[in-house]
Image (cartoon, rainbow, N blue to C red):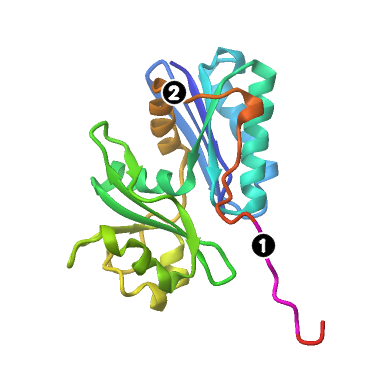
């Protein structure tokens, strides 16, 4: 089975391709350059594998949460490619991808993923490993003030439980998140990578959850952005 995965939802831009039981990928940290990087990445991977877009069995994309612009770029590119080659596709949570990376790299099975959502908030998700080797959500991904995260997770965390933290939110809000017991210091995994998108996405394809291009949707979690007016404005 041949699958292409792409993600542009955070400061990182990545693409990965699995074909003939091989996986190749590209990853680059390049804020605000995703629209320039993503399509050339995809083109290089397809050429290296010597396959055409139409030979793929499906597309997998990072659906958010994350940067509104980045999420839109990733979903837009995925839809365009799917329309062009008549392919089905599935979206995967950015937070779930980072949780899956924690299992792939370090066999962590209990993971709290956070992304700095700006406006003094974090996107957050809590994941545990299922019997199929996939990190699945214990709670729905959410956006909230970082000091409220421990309260949000409280019913699902045991006293003294050590969870593994991934994502950019931990460094952005160190003092607010210190009530949660996670791995000390800056998390090793700060951004999603399309390689883990492939793993989760193929599982979703096997479950029959793929959709046609017109039904692919971003997941912003924060549906609206409100700005506080300056005094006198």
Image quarter where the N terminus lies is top left
Above or below residue 213? Residue 129 is below
Checking the image for residue 155, the label placed there is: none
Magenta stretch bounds: 224-230
Left or right position of 179 against 172: left
Residue at numbered disc 1: 225
Percent across and percent down for residue 26 are 51, 38
Viewer-nearest residue: 101 or 134: 134
Percent across and percent down for residue 116 are 51, 63
- Work out which residue is located at the far front of the displayed protein and give it: 155
Left or right position of 196 against 233: left
Magenta segment's dominant SS is loop
Q: Is residue 199 magenta?
A: no
N-term-proximal mark, 2 vs 1:
2
Please, what secondary structure does the residue beneath circle 1 have?
loop
Left or right position of 216 against 175: right
Residue for point 26% across, 68% down:
181
Residue at numbered disc 2: 205
Above or below residue 233? Residue 124 is above
The number of numbered badges drawn on the structure is 2
Percent across and percent down for residue 70 are 63, 48
Viewer-nearest residue: 119 or 196: 119
Percent across and percent down for residue 46 are 57, 23
Residue for point 42% across, 28% down:
204
Please, what secondary structure does the residue beneath circle 2 have?
helix
CB contact under 8 Å: marks 2 and 1: no
Viewer-nearest residue: 191 or 64: 64
Image quadrant where residue 212 sits? top right
- Count neighbours of disc 1 (C-alpha within 10 A) and say few if under 14, some if 14 to 19, many if 20 or more: few
- Work out which residue is located at the far right of the displayed protein and give it: 233
């Amino acid at each position: 089975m041949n699958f292409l995965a792409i993600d542009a939802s955070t400061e990182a831009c990545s693409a990965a391709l699995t074909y003939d039981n091989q996986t190749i990928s590209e990853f680059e940290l390049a804020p605000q350059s995703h629209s320039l990087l993503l399509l050339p990445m995809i083109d290089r991977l397809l050429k290296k594998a010597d396959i055409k877009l139409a030979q793929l069995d499906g597309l997998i994309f990072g659906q958010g949460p994350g940067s509104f612009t980045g999420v839109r770029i990733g979903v837009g590119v995925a839809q365009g490619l799917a329309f062009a080659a008549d392919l089905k596709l599935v979206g995967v949570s950015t937070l779930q991808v980072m949780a899956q990376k924690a299992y792939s790299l370090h066999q962590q099975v209990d993971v709290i993923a956070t992304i700095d959502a700006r406006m003094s908030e974090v996107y957050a998700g809590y994941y545990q490993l299922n019997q199929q080797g996939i990190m699945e959500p214990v709670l729905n991904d959410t956006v909230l003030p970082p000091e409220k995260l421990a309260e949000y997770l409280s019913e699902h965390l045991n006293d003294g439980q050590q969870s593994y933290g991934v994502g950019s939110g931990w460094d952005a809000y160190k003092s607010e998140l210190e009530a949660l017991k996670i791995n000390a210091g800056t998390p090793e995994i700060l951004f999603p990578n399309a390689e883990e998108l492939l793993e989760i996405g193929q599982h979703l394809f096997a479950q029959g959850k793929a959709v046609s291009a017109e039904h692919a949707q971003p997941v912003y979690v924060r549906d609206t952005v409100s700005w506080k007016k300056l005094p006198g404005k």
